[in-house]
Image (cartoon, grey):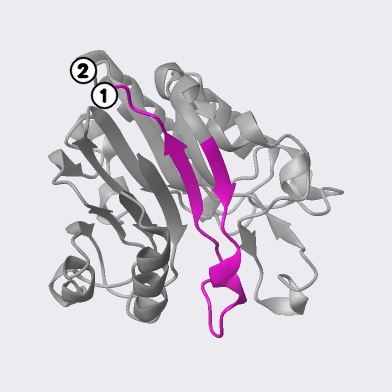
Amino acid sequence: MKIATWNVNSIRTRQEQVVDWLQTTKVDVLCLQETKVVDADFPRSPFEELGYHLYICGQKAYNGVAIFSLQPLQQVSTGFTTVVSGDEVGDLDEQKRVITGVVDGVRLVNLYVPNGASVGSDKYDYKLRWLKVLGAYLRSLLEKSPQALCVCGDFNIALEDRDIHNPQGKDKHIMASPAERQALQEVLAVGLADAFRKFTTEAGHFSWWDYRHGGFSRNRGWRIDHHYLTPNLYEQATSCRIDTSPRKLPKPSDHAPVIVEIYLDKD
């Protein structure tokens, strides 16, 4: 199974690029973030014509997540409150950032983690609260139905210094602060491992580059888009790579797709 995650930074703006990319890569599942469109206006037909089943959870101009799958998904749900109590979730589901479903015995969880704006801001506190509820959400999923789990998306966190082009002083920078990294480590403690680092250990590999200051051309990037896998899937993963080709196109997303390939033994 080939699963990709990609923050497209507006599906309507990037529609043709995504169609072309799917025709080239032929992934089984594509998890999108920042679709930035309400469900009624989502451009479904170009992707359905390629054979994909679409599962979407969007809002106007901001956020939004979607899963495209060549096989129909089962047990599809959106938001935290389908799994975690409403009192614990509070207002977090007002922003459309979570969608999940099951295919071939693998539960996919597609996430768009809040950016957090700046360390110490209200949005930063919101991000830390969101990550805490994410941990409860994943623990509950695994307790109710232990299964293979792929948690992917735009995490807006570079977990280690080697995930940043220049980590100096980044401990006070959004997406790399100690509190964010610790919060993500606590999420991963449910039993998840970084698929990319199974195959690539060195620094210098990134999935997001700022549009400003020649970020991409100078490779001044961050690795903030991830696939995290439960041990069974981690062992079955055969590759995980960042495809930088869409980032080279005119008017690209600032993110590149990340693709994990998993050998599923169905016997």
Q: How many numbered marks does the figure carry?
A: 2
Quarter residue 162 falls in: top right
Residue at the spot 27% in from the left edge and 41% down from the top edge: 90
Residue at the spot 39% in from the left edge and 74% down from the top edge: 20
Residue at the spot 51% in from the left edge and 47% down from the top edge: 155
Residue 254 sits inside the magenta stretch: yes
For the residue pair 210 and 260, the one nearer the viewer reads as: 260
Taking the view exactly as shown, the residue that stands out farthest to the right is: 168
Q: Are marks 1 and 2 in contact (CB under 8 Å)?
A: yes
Instruction: Report x, y in % for residue 209.
Output: 66, 65
Query: Could you say whether the residue bearing mark 1 is in a helix, strand or loop?
Result: helix
Instruction: Report x, y in % for residue 97.
Output: 33, 52
Instruction: Report x, y in % for residue 224.
Output: 59, 49
Q: Is residue 64 left or right of residue 82?
A: right
**Amino acid bearing label 2:** Ser
Residue at the spot 31% in from the left edge and 61% down from the top edge: 64
Q: Quadrant of the N terminus?
A: top left
Q: What is the distance, in whole Å, between disc 1 and disc 2 at their CAs?
A: 6 Å
For the residue pair 49 and 223, the one nearer the viewer reads as: 49
**Amino acid bearing label 1:** Leu
For the residue pair 40 and 241, the one nearer the viewer reads as: 241
Q: Residues within 10 Å of mark 1 (few under 14, many from 20)?
A: some
Residue under pointer 1: 141
Residue 109 sits inside the magenta stretch: no
Q: Is residue 205 left or right of residue 267?
A: right
Instruction: Report x, y in % for residue 46.
Output: 22, 75
Residue 129 at least partly seen? no
Query: Could you say whether the residue bearing mark 2 is in a helix, strand or loop?
Result: loop
Q: Which residues are magenta?
A: 239-265
Residue under pointer 2: 145
